Amino acid sequence: MGKVLVIGAGGVSSVTIHKMAQLKDQFKEITLASRTIQNCKKIKNKIKSKFNIDIRIEELDADNVSETSNIISKYNPELVINLALPYQDLNIMEACLNKNVHYLDTANYEPRDEAKFEYKWQWDLREKFEEKGLMALLGSGFDPGVTNVYTSYINKHYFDEINYLDILDCNGGEHGQHFATNFNPEINIREITQESKFFENGKWINGNPLSEKKEFDFPEIGKKNMYLMYHEELESLVKNFKTIKKARFWMTFGDSYLNHLNVLQNIGLTSIKPIKFKNTEIIPLEFLKEVLPDPSSLGKNTKGKTCIGTIVTGLKDNKTKTIYCYNVCDHKKCFEEVEGQAVSYTTGVPAMIGSLLMLKKIWFKPGVWNLEQFDPDPFIKYLNLYGLPNKIIELDEPLDF
Ligand code: NDP
């Protein structure tokens, strides 16, 4: 047991592989395949020098299904862990179906030419995975991922029914750069410049991007402005918990970050429409990604904490109550442990945990699933054991907004 193929060699992947190397009895053979072999080598060298473990590396363009299928055949893993970009999800899932291997990712599929993400494309593969006795676990990062598990844990242990769900994502860290994103800049900017969307009484309500702001006092961080956004876990959570009346997602941004973003948007640099540049076509956002700091390089100088959690209001014995479950993660401590910042850490650890639960068959059923469709208890146990402990408190009253 324990042969895995990780695809993608960025900030999240580096954390996941560090955490797997810490559990070398469970993850016996790790292969890392990604577009730029140099980035695979960097991770390989770190793992060798810290743990004296040899991981195997391969250059791979995961946009190419047959190339991906060949790498799977060559290494014969039990599980493929997709830590590349959302564009690759469907192709990697197809390669897994070709070669009869289980699949896990941290972000749902997104077409390159449209900034739109939804689970439909991946959920449509449910029957194919079921027929082959294969399992795909979607969104095993923090949000989505841990936030789905928090919701099902709160539902299981604290309520008869849950009615109001707010997911709050705060990065209170400072990286010392004028402008940088926490994870892949292209995916990040596509996500936050989308229309906002929340769920209320069976309907989705759209709004202008980042137009609704609230202040919240985050544990161990303090007061921050957070903005209403659409985030992918809302789609699966309202489907899987039918009693939810309202579900929202909030993320904090500082004023300087928003000013930079506004300027970049105003001058067209966040656009995904191709433009002509010196006899070739380029996509402005892809160009912008190249000039922004690489998120995996931010760890060394990032200070402060993240706080991501879920606030749920519902009924227990006919009384209304509100529960807040959250994790606080310290950027510096993450860097000391795995040479990555807390946003990569909070994503990379749950990817390792989802993989471990699948390999041990603690979470296993054929088909395509989101995390809230499994018993949350083993995931919560591993979060506490492997670096992302949670706190659960009862709030005096529901959110007043
Ligand atoms: P990075 O950009 O740092 O890493 C992405 C990696 O994928 C890079 O190594 C890149 O290669 C590789 N890659 C890109 N295209 C291909 C391809 N066609 N074939 C093979 N490899 C490819 O991103 P992050 O590590 O920050 O993020 C990884 C994933 O995690 C993303 O999907 C992101 O959306 C998701 N995420 C999820 C979160 C959650 O909480 N659920 C939070 C944060 C991120 P190269 O080295 O050549 O650039």
Image (cartoon, helix red, strand yellow):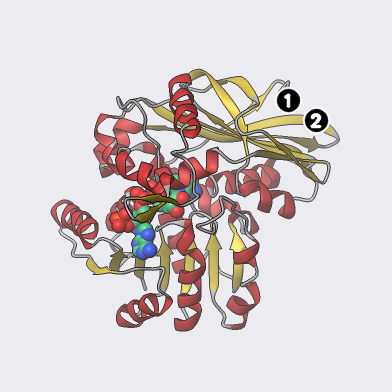
Is residue 16 visible in the rendered image? The answer is: no
Where in the figure is residue 370, as x and y percent of width and height? 60, 58
Badge number at residue 398: 1
Name the kind of residue labelled 2 in the image: Thr
Distance from the alpha carbon under mark 2 to that under mark 1: 9 Å
Q: 150 or 362: which is nearer to us?
A: 150
Quarter occupied by residue 393: top right
Helix, strand or loop for disc 1: loop
Residue holding disc 2: 320
Where in the figure is residue 297, as x and y percent of width and height? 26, 40
Where in the figure is residue 357, as x and y percent of width and height? 48, 62
Mark 1 sits near ligand 1, with its Cβ under 8 Å away: no
Is residue 189 visible in the rendered image? The answer is: yes
Helix, strand or loop for disc 2: strand
Going 44% across and 32% down the picture, which residue do you hit? 264
Left or right of residue 366: residue 301 = left
Going 61% across and 72% down the picture, which residue do you hit? 125
Residue most extreme to the top: 223
Q: Earlier in the sequence, mark 2 or mark 1?
A: 2
| CB within 8 Å, label 2 to label 1 | yes
Q: Classify the position of the N terminus by image quarter.
A: bottom left
Name the kind of residue labelled 1 in the image: Pro
Going 46% across and 52% down the picture, which residue do you hit? 274
Examine the rendered structure and indicate whether residue 182 appears above or below residue 58.
above
